[in-house]
Amino acid sequence: MTQETTLEVMVLVKAATWGLEILEYALHHICGRVHMEVQLHPLFKSWLNELADDLEVLVEVMALINALEKHGRDLGDPESHPVSTASYDLHALRRFPPTETTPYAEGPPVLRILFGYVQDNSGNELAVVTLGGDKTELGNRWYQANVTQAQDRLDQWCQHNPTYKPIVKRGGLR
């Protein structure tokens, strides 16, 4: 692990003990290197707060979000993959199997973090993280139960941020 990576992990761990607001500050301002702006839906933030009991998992989830900020659309397999059943440009961050971003994710929970891309009137894109969950028991059936909810949350976020619209992947309007 490089000195820079060690510093990032230490900042993430310390920030996690201080709360999400400090953690977001650390990701945006201390770690730097932001390639794409990432916003967190309020209900996703609530889910993150529930992870506070398992600091290791929380740090891994935040490392995935940091990777999304750092790489933007260039973040691909194995950390992220498109959700084929979504009508919006929706993707899933993967905590498991282990990756360069989450090297210690050896087993459950098998988390998926759904995010979608939105665009403002000028064509600027950002990612909105909408939903997270454990697909250990449901396997790929987890997506059926959560894709619609993630797209609904993306719509909600855009209603509160009216200069942005979800990027539709196929089939016109949702």
Image: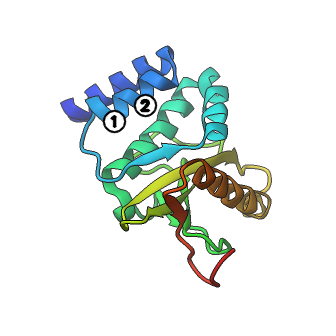
Left or right of 147, for residue 116: left
Q: Is residue 74 above or below residue 37?
A: below
- Relative image position of residue 151 (x, y in whole percent): 67, 61
The residue sitting at 62% across, 27% down in the picture is 49
**Is residue 100 in view?**
no
Q: Residue 142: name its quadrant.
A: bottom right
- Relative image position of residue 112 (x, y in whole percent): 61, 51
- Name the residue tied to disc 1: 28
Please identify the residue farthest to the left as the structure is shown: 3
Q: Secondary structure at mark 2?
A: helix
- Relative image position of residue 132 (x, y in whole percent): 64, 46
| Viewer-closest of 24 and 15 | 24
Location of the N terminus (image quadrant): top left
- Name the residue tied to disc 2: 24
Q: Are marks 1 and 2 in contact (CB under 8 Å)?
A: yes
Q: Is residue 21 above or below residue 118?
A: above
Left or right of 26, for residue 56: right
Circle 2 residues within 10 Å: few <14, some 14–19, many ≥20: some
| Viewer-closest of 78 and 119 | 119
Left or right of 36, for residue 1: left
The residue sitting at 43% across, 31% down in the picture is 24
**Mark 1 and mark 2: Cα distance apart in space:** 6 Å
The three-letter code of the residue at mark 1 reads His
